[in-house]
């Protein structure tokens, strides 16, 4: 039988999407509407400063190329590809270039989790072990102050789904000095490296490791969103890539977002570079080892292609990601249909950490600026967003009704700061 259940789901979702596109007026259709900067309260002259700054960064050989997009009041007021998609072959950077968005995958996976939460599949205070039994009875690593052998003791409580969403689970990443070697030895996936296994395989291995601290005690950026990706699979009965495709990407018209892009689109994937020995260099063909963290640039198109990393695996474009951001900014709505409710978006963009977290607030899937500490640069208290390992970033500003997306492929980035400069230049262009 050539038509599989998964294929039928994809076909039905696509047909429904096309029909709704024809039948209704589209706030975010196949393409975000465009507008002159002045019509949405921005200055054309001042926006041009973005192009000047990015061009200078390219000339200074800090970055090879970039795509920048500024959306206001639901319309694209500025979008520009600059520099090179691939410097060595002199391929110019197109506006529809694809990028490894890494941790910008996390907000998308979080939306998937919250969609299932709205369906009553679980509560945020449920222990994750209720759905993933391998996390039952967690233990915490103890390192004696006198330098004795490390050991583990029972955690004071179990990890909840809320802990995973807000990074208070006690899990960490492979770069952690205390647990990184254990993760590495246990073959726990990071999402930014070829991996011969599924997210279910990696999560089971992760669950067997001790925690860095008791759940809820503090904030530690972690592989918790990969665990949430596995939760989506278990609760929905669908592989994570298929759930995201049917429930998020197709309704939003995100036609260029994948864990593993099809071969015919790989040529649009921007080449990765890094600041090595103080000089921007093409990312090496072999993996880079940084302590206990090993990462590569070829994982989206080489290797087994079985790992759907909910915390870091997606490839996308500026335009696709802008559609996702606009849905969030519009309180979870697309074409008059709610992917999420307004109240859920409020919860996700409300600080969940209080005194246990860093100065930057953190909600469910998003960092939140200017609410726990003063803003560092131009912006608005309550704006939220995040970034990715290969130097991609986004900001959503509900008060200004503005989205800023900046896509580059650079790691390590050294002291390159064009990311922050672009955001400042987008805000200084507001003139309404």
Image: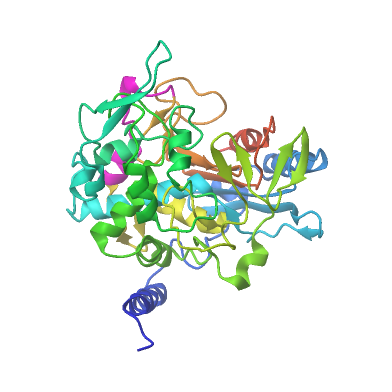
* Viewer-nearest residue: 420 or 224: 224
Quick check: is 357 in the magenta stretch? yes
- Asked if residue 110 shows in the view, the reply is no
Expressed as whole percent of the image width and height from the top left, the position of residue 244 reads 38, 61
Q: Is residue 384 above or below residue 375?
A: below
- Quarter of the image holding residue 337? bottom left
Expressed as whole percent of the image width and height from the top left, the position of residue 34 reads 57, 58
Taking 425 as reference, is 84 left or right? right
Expressed as whole percent of the image width and height from the top left, the position of residue 317 reads 57, 57
Quick check: is 141 in the magenta stretch? no
| Residue plotted at (50% across, 55% down) | 195
Expressed as whole percent of the image width and height from the top left, the position of residue 57 reads 76, 39
| Residue plotted at (27% across, 38% down) | 162
Taking 125 as reference, is 383 left or right? right
* Viewer-nearest residue: 379 or 226: 226
Q: Is residue 409 above or below residue 300?
A: above
- Quarter of the image holding residue 327? bottom left
What is the number of callouts on the image? 0
* Viewer-nearest residue: 86 or 148: 148
Name the quarter where the C terminus is drawn. Answer: top right
Look at the image and give the residue range highlighted in magenta.
Answer: 343-359
The colour style of the image is: rainbow
Name the quarter where the N terminus is drawn. Answer: bottom left
- The residue sitting at the top extreme is 146
- Asked if residue 86 shows in the view, the reply is yes
- The residue sitting at the bottom extreme is 1
């Amino acid at each position: 039988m050539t038509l599989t259940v998964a294929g039928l789901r994809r076909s039905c979702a696509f047909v429904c999407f096309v029909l709704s596109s024809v039948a209704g007026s589209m706030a975010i259709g196949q393409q975000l509407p465009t507008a002159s900067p002045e019509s949405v309260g921005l200055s054309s002259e001042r926006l041009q400063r973005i192009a000047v700054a990015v061009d200078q960064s390219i000339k200074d050989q800090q970055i090879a190329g970039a795509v920048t997009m500024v959306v206001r009041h639901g319309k694209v007021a500025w979008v520009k590809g600059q520099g090179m998609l691939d410097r060595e072959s002199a391929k110019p950077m197109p506006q529809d270039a694809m990028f490894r968005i890494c941790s910008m995958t996390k907000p998308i996976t979080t939306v998937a989790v919250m969609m299932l939460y709205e369906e009553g599949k679980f509560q945020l205070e449920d222990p994750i072990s209720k759905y993933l039994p391998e996390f039952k009875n967690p233990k915490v690593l103890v390192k004696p102050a006198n330098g004795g052998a490390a050991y583990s003791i029972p955690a004071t409580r179990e990890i909840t789904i809320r802990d995973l969403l807000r990074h208070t689970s006690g899990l960490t990443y492979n770069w952690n000095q205390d647990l990184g070697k254990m993760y590495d030895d246990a073959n726990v996936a990071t999402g930014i490296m070829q991996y011969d296994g599924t997210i279910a395989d990696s999560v089971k291995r992760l669950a067997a490791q001790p925690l860095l601290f008791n759940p809820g005690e503090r904030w530690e950026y972690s592989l918790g969103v990969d665990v949430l990706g596995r939760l989506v699979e278990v609760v929905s009965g669908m592989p994570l890539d298929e759930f995201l495709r049917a429930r998020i990407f197709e309704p939003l018209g995100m036609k260029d977002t994948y864990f593993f892009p099809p071969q015919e689109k790989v040529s649009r994937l921007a080449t990765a570079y890094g600041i090595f020995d103080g000089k921007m260099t093409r990312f090496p063909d072999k993996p880079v080892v940084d302590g206990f963290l090993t990462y590569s640039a070829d994982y989206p198109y080489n290797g087994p292609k079985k790992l759907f990393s909910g915390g870091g695996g997606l490839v996308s474009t500026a335009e696709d990601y802008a559609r996702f951001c606009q849905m969030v900014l519009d309180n979870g709505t697309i074409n008059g249909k709610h992917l999420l409710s307004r109240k859920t978006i409020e919860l996700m963009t409300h600080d969940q950490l209080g005194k246990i977290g860093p100065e930057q607030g953190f909600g469910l899937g998003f960092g939140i600026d200017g609410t726990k500490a003063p803003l560092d640069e131009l912006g608005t208290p309550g704006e939220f967003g995040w970034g990715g390992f290969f130097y991609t970033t986004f900001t959503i500003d509900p008060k200004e009704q503005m989205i800023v997306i900046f896509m580059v492929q650079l790691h390590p980035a050294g002291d390159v700061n064009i990311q922050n400069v672009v955001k400042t230049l987008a805000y200084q262009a507001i003139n309404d």
